Image: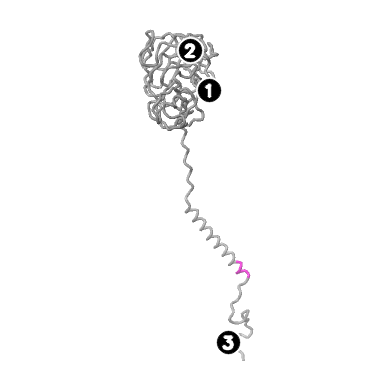
Amino acid sequence: MTDASAPPDAPQPAGGPGRRRAPGPGRSRWLAAGGVAVLAGVLGLTLALRAGAAPACAAPPAAAPPAAAAPPVGGAVHKGKATFYDSKGAGGNCSYPSAPANRLYVALGPSEYAAGAACGGHLDVTGPKGTVRVLVMDQCPECAPGHLDLSREAFARIADPVQGVVSVSYRAVVDPPLPGPLAFRIKEGASRYWFAVLVADHGNPLRAVEVRQGDSGGWRAADRQDYNYWLVESGVGPGPFSIRVTDVYGHRVIAGGVRLTPGQVQRGTVRMYGGATAGGGRPAARSASPRPSASPSPRASSPRPSPSAAPASAGPSAPDTPVVPLAAEAPAAGCRN
């Protein structure tokens, strides 16, 4: 018997009754593509969330600029360490003819030697055994800021040399007692066309040296060299010269009659400060700024510096005073051993 409700030729579902028809190939491809797209979207969202949650990389902090080289001034107390060495009698990188007679001197690292700006100043150095006053005479190229390389004699005043290295405190001495009037040494090779002079016995570090031919005319600024000579590359003339000297605390004096005698120390009659002079001379007025200079005078930027006008002074200049020549000295050592 046949079912009258079904047409006789109706097609039967594939696989027989009760089974799901398998999807065709077109639908399978559509489902696969859709799944890949969904998976890619999920992965992209996850990565985006992670990237957004992660903090941005912070820029590294900028390195602090190196401190400008400058000699110790003003009496502020510094902390550091001390070692010792022997100059073997030489006057060090400051080009002095010899070490001081008391053998109490110090070499400073480049940041405090400051290309010669510290030369001729004095420090009071305190260690385990006491305090010693030393002349800045030399440079210690390998010494960091705060590292003082004392003479053996100076080190023995503050510590047992067996220790080798000790902690110290130190300060610049303002207006130390002077050993006498200013002294000058014209460098070997100087002539009317090339001038270089060493100034000594000034007590405090110097800020400026100016030179003129005779006792009139404009002043020419000399450039400090790192070996402690003051240079006028194009010369000042045949001499005799007047030399005006200013220290970092504003003391200013003029010495006259400095002769063009290379290699010879010439002792003047005017002191850097204190008011006492030999032969009745008087120092020039103290310059307008009593504050110490924060940095050394710049080194020459041109091989032939041009003359410069005289800086303003707080008062009238002193009359030039004669310079008494001393015996010739042996040339100084050019650098610290």
Which residue shows up at 64% across the image and 84% down it?
9
310 is within the stretch colored magenta: no
Which residue shows up at 40% across the image and 31% down it?
128
Mark 1 vs 3, N-terminal side = 3
Q: Nearer the viewer, residue 187 or 160?
A: 160
Q: Residue furthest bottom?
A: 1
Judge depth for marks 3 and 2 and give the one in front.
Answer: 2
Give the spatial CA distance, label 2 vs label 1.
Answer: 20 Å
27 is within the stretch colored magenta: yes
According to the picture, the residue beneath numbered tag 1 turns out to be 335
Give the spatial CA distance, label 1 vs label 3.
Answer: 125 Å
Magenta segment, prevailing SS (helix, strand or loop): helix
Mark 3 vs 2, N-terminal side = 3
Three-letter residue code for mark 2: Val
Local SS, label 3: loop
Q: Which residues are magenta?
A: 25-29
Mark 2 vs 1, N-terminal side = 2
Label 1 crowd (10 A; few <14 / some 14-19 / many >=20)? some
Q: Nearer the viewer, residue 78 or 2?
A: 78
Residue 222: % across, % down: 48, 17
Label 3 crowd (10 A; few <14 / some 14-19 / many >=20)? few
Residue 298: % across, % down: 48, 23
Numbered tag placed on residue 5 in the rendering? 3
Q: Nearer the viewer, residue 206 or 146?
A: 146
Three-letter residue code for mark 3: Ser
The answer to whether mark 2 and mark 1 are in CB contact below 8 A is no
Q: Is residue 265 above or below residue 23?
A: above
